[in-house]
Image (tube, rainbow, N blue to C red):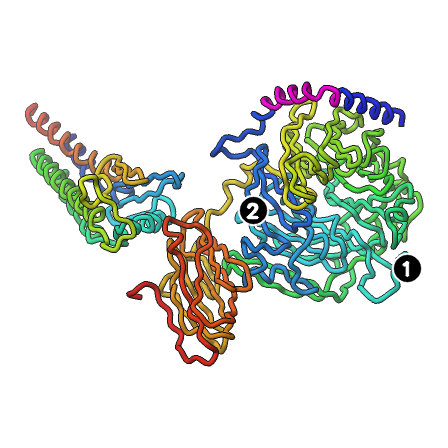
Amino acid sequence: MKKSNIIMLIAALLPLGLFLFPLWNITLEAPQYPIPLGMNIHINDFADAHPHDIKNINLMNHYVGMKYIPDAIPEFKIFPIGIIISTIIGLLIAFKGNYKWFLGWFILMVVLSTAGIYDFYLWEHDYGHNLDPKAIMKFTNPDGTVMGFQPPLFGTKHILNFTAHSYPRLGAYLLGFGIFTSLIAYFIGKKQVKKV
Amino acid sequence: MKKLFNSTIGFLIIALIFTSCNNGESKSNSALSSNVAEKVYVAPGEHDEFYAFISGGFSGQLSVYGLPSGRLFKVIPVFSQDAEKAWGYNEETKPMLNTSHGFIPWDDSHHPDISQTAGKLDGRYIYINANNTPRIAKIDLTTFETTEIIEIPNSAGNHSSSFVTENTEYVVAGTRFSVPIPQRDMSIKDYKGNFKGSLSFLKVNPENGEMAIKFQILMPGFDYDLSHPGRGKSHGWFFFTTYNTEEANSLLEVNASQNDKDFIAAINWKKIEEYVNNGGGTKMPTNYAHNIYSDETHTATSTMINEVLTVNPLDVPGAVYFLPTPKSPHGCDVDPTGEYIVGNGKLSANLTVHSFTKMLDAIENKKFDGEAYGIPILKFEDVLAGSVEQPGLGPLHTEFDGKGNAYTTFFISSEVVKWKLGTWEVLDRKPTYYSVGHLMIPGGNSAEPFGKYVVAMNKITKDRYLPTGPEVTQSAQLYDISGDKMELLLDFPTIGEPHYAAGCPASLIEANSKKLYKLEENKHPYAAKSDADTKVVRKGNEVHVQMTMIRSHFSPDNIEGIKVGDKVFFHITNLEQDYDVPHGIAMIGANTSELLIMPGQTETFVWEPKQVGVWPFYCTDFCSALHQEMQGYVRVSPASSNIELSWSLGDDF
């Protein structure tokens, strides 16, 4: 097996780490939460960072009319299937294909990931802006529009008394590393072909 | 006596110097206190190094302090009703205060002791005695709640209690007052020779710390004052001080102070345990309560037990001896090695220390000095290790620092005296303000004391704090004992009257402290674990409301169909699963306390409405920004009304 195909094999396997490790994490800090509230987003689940965190995030957020974080969303079914299918394609390419296919897989994965992030953004936006009209507390921005409570897609943001952090976790790093590795496999494969 | 005279003169001179230059004293004090302040300063948000569990005495409770700051964290309700926490008021904890005399709302708590493993504190449980109606309580140090109370039959004035053996095999409860056993109608004047003193050994279940009376030794009718277990080489023995060996039944302050020597009773409990395990002892009919609180049902049950196993010490040869000890000894303290047994003869000029090794030798070689009611008395000279000569007046209690030093409190001369084990020389003395009783070094009653601080617990404070009318606080004082000389660091007020205390490094307990009760583990028969479980059910004139509470509403919060003459049980479950989010509830006109319910817990109060109307209830613990909105109404209709029960929350319930 060629060196580039071995690297491609590794690249195709790395995204499977998403089944073991969380994809993303949102953490909320506030003075009265010396242990911050946190939620780990897996490809098939929302999980408490500490026991009961999601319940307590819901309790906090209902004051401003935010919906409860759902137990399940359609993405939890779609994402795992997407990862498994793209891994199978990646493995087939690694065993059978040449380096040009590696680039194809790389582009496929970049497109899928971008779509995933966009989907995540849409959910976050809805979560932060689609508020109950009977909300206990209503806040407006300086320009008079209704204040939203959307957590950042990536980074840190102050929302009222909370500081919200939103960052990728090991699962996302493995996915990203896998995608990047497929690009390396492509360049190595290309170089080897030229040598020959 | 000469030394005492000299030190009195010395003290007078010092007192004169201080009174003649008051300004100088306060200046030097402030220079000193800046250095001292650093030693007790625990910065905001920082934690103390030690827990101190200080008994509440006539408050009946146990207080939790931090050392060195002297900050009060919690008062754990034990033997007295506590309206703040609904202890003994709510339906769940009323059985905890049940006894053979019925429900008792108060007691006098004295001697907390932390459970031990291999002679060292293990920080799992605290046991504490009720002095008046004899009982022992167990406090679970994961929840800091009282989870068991067991009554001690055939006992009266449960004072030489509740000390644990080095592996918490037993918790021991000795009677202070001897009484007729079994109780009967007889002339008080016939006390002598007829009354008995019971020493009870409660076997501890190593799994959950629960107690069961294994046997009671029926001793001669003396007063059994205090006790401590042997440890290390003397493990298997227990030592009890006695007074009133005169067996007086009136004017004891005179009549019980006549004998030159009273006794320390040495009990070989391993020998008696073996005797009992082989079928020894006599079962005696009796009646006592055993109350257990469950963290799963959040409810206590009280069981009456009607038999106890008694042991006549004469039936177990070699198990019980008397060690003559001068003048009504009070504290009975065993050093960390288990070799020395200190008898704090409260009316004696000297402090008597017995040697365990010499005691065994005296027993083996039958160095007896007569007997009392058939129990051999060992020769004083043959068990004496040494005595501390004229260390002060009125010695009460001794603790140890684990570095070969002992610290004894002197009530009359109001001081703590440091002396050396083995050489018996006095090393240092510091005044207490005033009239110190017990003292406590964390781990001081174990094989491994943490000899950094000693806490002196004083009976009298007079001018030490801002006055509060005729009744002023009692007080603890913290001394640094890490150096050669003791240094007074801090005064801090205590609840009730502090008798003994127990302390241990915070690290032993801190990590095990529970943050909440898990809702899914709640097995209360009337728990409502979600809004779907809430309901109101009538059974004749009893109405059971199963209600939930969460930030910031009750569910249901409107109830109709209650009638005058009903007995309404409010069973309320706190649905929160977050640290430090309790909710309270109080109902106008309810003849009981509020409830203060921890996350995941269910508690019940009873309300018997007497007047027609619409009556509100509300949350008593400021729980959130919407706390003031956490309220509800109950409609009470005339007894003859036929309005059906209904309940709701919000418009769309």
Is B89 situated above or below A164? below
Q: Is residue B367 left or right of residue A25?
A: right
Quarter of the image for residue A167 reads: top left
Q: Quadrant of the C terminus of chain B?
A: bottom left
- Of helix, strand and loop, which mostly describes the magenta segment? helix
Task: State the residue position of label 1.
Answer: B189
Q: Is residue A89 visible?
A: yes
Q: Which residues are magenta?
A: B18-35
Q: Residue at x 18, y 51 (%)?
A: A78
Q: Amino acid at mark 1?
A: Lys
Q: Amino acid at mark 2?
A: Leu
- The subunit carrying tag 2 is B
Quarter of the image for residue B556 reads: bottom left
- Quick one: label 1, few (<14), some, or many (20+) residues within 10 Å? few
Q: Point out residue A176 in the picture as x, y percentages from the top left corner.
A: 20, 35
SS at circle 1: helix
Q: Are marks 1 and 2 in contact (CB under 8 Å)?
A: no
Is B597 situated above or below B642? above
Choose the circle earlier in sequence order: 1 or 2: 2
Q: Is residue B4 left or right of residue B451?
A: right
Is A36 situated above or below B528? above
Residue B23 among magenta residues: yes
- The subunit carrying tag 1 is B
Q: Point out residue A12 in the picture as x, y percentages from the top left corner.
A: 18, 39
Discs 1, 2: same chain: yes
Q: Which mark, by number, is residue B141?
A: 2
- Quick one: label 2, few (<14), some, or many (20+) residues within 10 Å? many
Is residue B75 or residue A96 the one in the foreground?
B75
Q: Is residue A85 left or right of residue B535?
A: left
**Front of the two marks 1 and 2:** 1
